[in-house]
Image: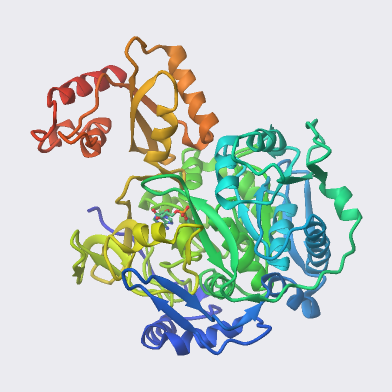
Amino acid sequence: MSEVKVHPVMAHIAEHALIDDAGYQRMYQESIQNPEQFWGEQGKRIDWIKPYTKVKNTSYDPGHISIKWFEDGTLNLSANCIDRHLATKADEVAIIWEGDSPDDDKKVTYRELHEQVCRFANVLKAQGVKKGDVVSLYMPMVVEAAVAMLACARIGAVHSVVFGGFSPDALASRIIDSNAKLVITSDEGLRGGRTVPLKANVDAALAKSGVSADCKVIVYRRTGGDVAWDKTRDIWWHEAAAKVDAHCEPEEMSAEDPLFILYTSGSTGTPKGVLHTTGGYLVYAAMTFEYIFDYHEGDVHWCTADVGWVTGHTYILYGPLANGATTLMFEGVPNYPKTNRMSQIVDKHQVNILYTAPTAIRAFMAKGNEAVEGTSRSSLRILGSVGEPINPEAWEWYYRVIGEERCPIVDTWWQTETGGILISPLPGATLLKAGSATRPFFGVQPALVDGEGNILDGATDGNLVILDSWPGQMRTIYGDHDRFEQTYFSTFPGTYFCGDGARRDEDGYYWITGRVDDVLNVSGHRMGTAEIESALVAHPKIAEAAIVGVPHEIKGQGIYAYITLNSGEVPSAELHKEVKDWVRKEIGPIATPDVIHWAEGLPKTRSGKIMRRILRKIATGETDTLGDTSTLADPAVVDRLIEERDRHA
Ligand code: WTA
């Protein structure tokens, strides 16, 4: 390994930080030794209608996986994120919205947010949405996306946000799986100067078989573009909102009532509806936001994620608002109209905390100074990274160029399933090593295990597991608790297995090495190889497909597709384009293969299992370390694949 760059805690950060190293050590020990006491105290950081008397009731026992936190307490999440700040900060800005065009922005105060959320909550009620009903969102990055999520929470409806980049097919399968009663969308989205046909996509999704014929659609007018209209089904947001009043009492929810479903990819099968509940999630979101970003009153926080991903849920919306912070929502893309857009937004809105992804950092890095041209970024205090391992070069560039060596970087490791960050530095407490997510957050007990599940000590590599529950943990897979147990608790019984591998160094620091299962991470987006493969084989000319991830300079991982055509079909430039378009249509542009390798046959074991290990090596050109190929049904396949690859390269 090349030499590790170490960055001590900065004095100017430590001076004002919420916690130092001794404080971290002490609190961490407390959180592990006495979780009841620790979380019992931390739970008080939010307002409860009926206070809890029970704190933790969790079991990782095989066959009895059950996770409950604060179970007899009641609360409302929207009241916690909005109403309780009204007494002291009604006129402070809750959301800064920056449009796709640099000329387009607005600020929404806590008072205004309260009014909008109450009004929209009444719109939902008027449509018959009740506590426990599922509402799908397919929205651009506009304030109304946040309003809709908070309005759901206000009346006890469960939101299921679907990323606006997903195709109608992907949207339809999520609407069907979640039994959504209603879809909230926009006429069009606007990103990088181009429109995205969101309403048309919803129309196409709702036309698929299996979607309830009663499903209503509320449409927020963003661009004013032409959309088809079904009078019996479609409702304009502005018209409906004008008809209801602006008062809506928050619904009293039990801590374990569902808050949201968010679909994510796994190594097998269709995307899973990760279910989060109300109380524990909010406590964990609020606490991690405060400590990890060292949040201080008045800070402007900008997380560049989309609300369609968990990072948007927890660190654009719920974590910041639970703390009464000002959070920035950006509609566009960070390099439009020019490469320095992200830095310009930082200056324009005096952003103090910037939370973005390694893929964006690498894309900027490739442009050198253009990313910061004409900007000072002097407001920045804390930088964050999330979504995939950050390579040390990108880390150092982020640190040096964006942060001018003034801002600590918190490399935050977590997942849709974990609700909030599990491993991360704390700005005033943790010595940083470029490329390491460092140490566990309070209450989190990571461990490394070998293939048999034996816990490994000291500096070592292994599969990353978590030994006990934390309040932000997912509770189940919507509608399929068995799959929940199978996916996360059966590989290494007694622990939560996240699917990532990691290394722990001599100082106990964790270095996430990436997925150890068949999940890809492309530009920070999670994608199951099985999902892309099944989209491919649905194409009438394709007989078989296998997907592997290959290193990609900007995206982290690229998608390499091995495709076997039906007999009689021949590869061509047209078919190449047709196949790429097909995947875009079936899943969305983020799943488009980078490389298509027309293969005559795929390497299989005698029992017919595709040997991905070999396909990965061939894709990356590591053909001299293929390992044992003698168990293959037809070893000659490998030589043919290597030849074909050389032709493709
Ligand atoms: C990866 C995003 C290394 C990891 C919050 C995980 C990371 C998956 C990091 C979850 C990080 C996320 N360092 N890898 N700081 N953050 N990952 O569900 O493989 O979209 O399992 O949640 O992203 O992706 P998800």
**Where's residue 483, x and y in %?**
40, 57
**Where on the image, by quarter, is ligand 1?**
bottom left
589 or 460, nearer to the observer: 589
Q: Can see residue 234?
A: yes
- Within the image, what quadrant is residue 628 found in? top left
> Which residue in the rendered view is the most extreme toward the left?
630
**Where's residue 347, x and y in %?**
67, 54
523 or 548, nearer to the observer: 548
Query: Does 495 appear above or below 404?
Result: below
**Where's residue 502, x and y in %?**
29, 59
Residue 391 relative to residue 85: left or right: left
Q: Which colour scheme is used?
A: rainbow
Q: How many marks overall? A: 0
**Quadrant where the C terminus lies?**
top left
Query: Does 337 appear above or below 421?
Result: above
**Where's residue 632, x and y in %?**
13, 32
Measuring 40% from the left and 49% from the top, which residue is drawn there? 266
Residue 639 relative to residue 209: left or right: left
Residue 227 relative to residue 512: left or right: right
Measuring 56% from the left and 36% from the top, which residue is drawn there? 169
Query: Does 263 appear above or below 101?
Result: below
Query: Does 193 appear above or below 377?
Result: above
Q: Can see residue 557?
A: no
Measuring 21% from the left and 19% from the top, which residue is drawn there? 643
